[in-house]
Amino acid sequence: MTWIWLRGLGREAGHWGGLPNHAESLLNEPIITLDIPGCGRKRHQSCPLSMGPIVQELMRDVDDALVSIGNRAQAMSFQSNDAQSSSTQSRSTQSRSTQSRSTQSSEARPPSKAVAVSSSSFSSSSFKVLGLSLGGLVGLHWASVDRRVERLVVVNSSSRLSPFYHRLRPLGAMKLLSAALAMDKSRERRERRILSAVSNKPHRAKQVAPLWSEIARHRPAALTQVFRQLLLAGATSVPALDQLKHCQLTFLASRGDRLVDYRCSARLAQFYHSTLKLHDNAGHDIPLDDPEWLLTQIAALEVDCNSPLTGC
């Protein structure tokens, strides 16, 4: 089943780095990284101040992406069938060289069922969503209106269920403000300041600083759009519990998050009667600070789902 990954405030798909490719190999599932309006491939769009338009656009994005995956799968199936058919015909020719070509043709395999499936059926397939920070809040609203979202993993997110001083901790807010003030002077300095707010692992931050600076040079998120995303996050309430009963919810957070208090995730998990798993010392950007822990948690969810005792 396909995963959809969403980043947070002012971040884009490129900030995942090489993690999606690594995750695909580990989980043996395709991963699609999408952008929220105002960032990345959608940096020229204005971020809506309500979740509805964002979710509708993401649903269109995932429809296109799933159909594309389906088309690639069909093409591979065609190639495989052609190779098998050619091999069968070759063996038949060698063993019965005196038979006519019509006999060889009658032995050719018909198209497989996988090939016969319309690509439009892929867009109706279920999928899973992982959302970091604002991406997690978007994921909750997406799952509330799209029953194809079978599983949702929410990482270090916050909501109006928690007090504002938990949603944006004072020290973290100061660092983000410092980064915003540095935007016009030096994008590199801005990214270093952002990393100091979201990461507790200096060596990891140092490794990705060149990539993040490169993204800031080529696909910068406008300060006005980041501010609109911040307004969106602050003004949006979470969906009701009944709207998410079809979806398997898991919340991940870190006690070491200096930007958003982990108790915001605890409150969300309590509200949705869902599982909360805590990292001891990673920063707000768990995928950056401890990607292996994140992927281990995701893989464990799949094992639990397939267990005869705890099957989903």
Image (tube, grey):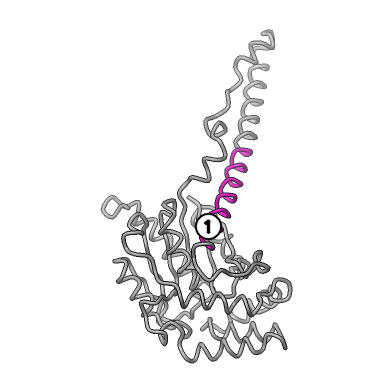
Residue 15 % position (x, y): 61, 71
Residue named by callout 1: 56
Q: Is residue 65 magenta?
A: yes
Q: Residues within 10 Å of mark 1 (few under 14, many from 20)?
A: few
Which element type, helix, strand or loop, lies under badge 1?
A: helix
Residue 304 % position (x, y): 34, 57
Q: Nearer the viewer, residue 130 or 78?
A: 130
Magenta region, residue range: 54-76
The answer to which quarter of the image holds residue 141 is: bottom left
Secondary structure mostly taken by the magenta-highlighted segment of the chain = helix
The answer to whether residue 292 is left or right of residue 262 is right
The answer to whether residue 5 is left or right of residue 281 is right
Depicted 214 relative to depicted 108: above or below: below
Q: Nearer the viewer, residue 208 or 7?
A: 7
Q: Residue at x 47, y 52 (%)?
A: 127
Kind of residue indicated by mark 1: Gln
Q: Residue at x 39, y 77 (%)?
A: 160
Depicted 179 relative to depicted 267: above or below: below
